[in-house]
Image: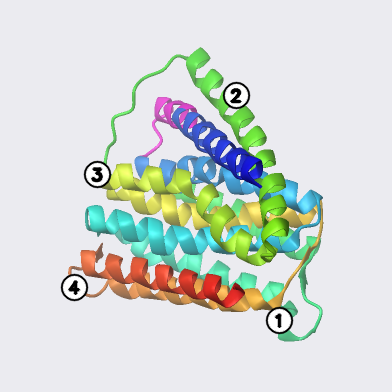
Amino acid sequence: MVISLILIIIGFAALIYGANWMVDGASSLAKKHNISDLAIGLTIVAFGTSAPELVVNSMASIDGFSDIVLGNIIGSNNFNLFIILGIAGLVYPIKVQSSTAWREIPISLIITILLLLLANDLFLNANSRISRFDGLILFILFLIFIFYVFKQMKTDDGEVVAYELKSNLQIWKLISFGLLGLIVGGKLVVDNSISVATDLGVSQKIIGLTIIAAGTSLPELLTSVVAALKKNSDIAIGNVIGSNIFNILLILSISSFIKPINYNDIFNIDLFILIGGTLFLILAMFTGKRKKLDRWEAAVLVIFYLTYTIYLILKET
């Protein structure tokens, strides 16, 4: 088991470096085409930092590990919302652009509710799953979201971030090595996490919701904390909200295309928590300092998540 744990750590390192290289390359490419920082946060950075979830889920889906697939997506979204946005907000109160407060955050809420309904087959059937048709619905919504974001680029004036100019060769080397790191890291994480779960007698659900979710969310954590330190709220919150939208609409749809996902209704609790957390974020935009996540609100997010995670682990033991 010690070797498996070491390989998981190596896998996470490969995922983090891979995602970082991919984000650097893609962001440089985007800035060459004058794409705004908010759009980069909601698309390129969100996709790059969600890439570990995509790779891990694709491999887990191929092997038929539905609880890993669902635990990783739902767990990552909760980790993004409660821990990453919470820590970023503790570092520096996050000021939210009007468009994000009014549109992107509610979009994240709506698609989470949609996932709850689709996964439970509208609560009409006992044997629920996320079918390829459900995945198609999510993927079509993903394409609509991408179209919406690029339309927004023409109207939103976000904060400006300085990016180091890179040559085309440097950009494509970063993207290529980034993808390689993601693939190798994803394989190491999935295979060895299953091995550890088997040895410890822990369910795939808990492994997915905790270890894998937190590990694949490390790129989002690093990106948002660095953005908060630089007082760039657009990237910090755009990365988290964009990543959550990507996880459900793109990554879960691709996972269902590979193989329909059997849905364990025990995940409903975690989806309700995600819905509740998103509602709290919306309310936070209109309490205290308007359109700003204050430090006390960020602290509430972090404390709640840590308490719930401890409860999950204690319940398994």
Judge depth for marks 2 and 1 and give the one in front: 2
Residue type of the residue flagged with mark 2: Ser
Q: Which residue is drawn at the image coordinates 58% and 53% (left, top)?
A: 212
Give the Cα separation between the discs numbered 2 and 3: 29 Å
Location of mark 3 (residue) = 229
Location of mark 1 (residue) = 122
Would you say the residues marked 1 and 4 are in contact, meaning their CB atoms lie under 8 Å apart?
no
Mark 1 or mark 4: which comes first in sequence?
1
State the predominant SS element of the stretch in magenta. helix
Q: Which residue is drawn at the image coordinates 61% and 58% (left, top)?
A: 72
Q: Is residue 309 above or below residue 15?
A: below
Would you say the residues marked 2 and 1 are in contact, meaning their CB atoms lie under 8 Å apart?
no
Q: Which mark is residue 49?
A: none
Give the Cα separation between the discs numbered 1 and 4: 37 Å
Quadrant of the drawing holding the C terminus = bottom right
Q: Which residues are magenta?
A: 25-36
Q: Position of residue 256 (x, y in %)?
A: 76, 57
- Is residue 82 located in the magenta-colored stretch of the structure? no
Give the Cα separation between the discs numbered 1 and 3: 42 Å
Location of mark 4 (residue) = 288
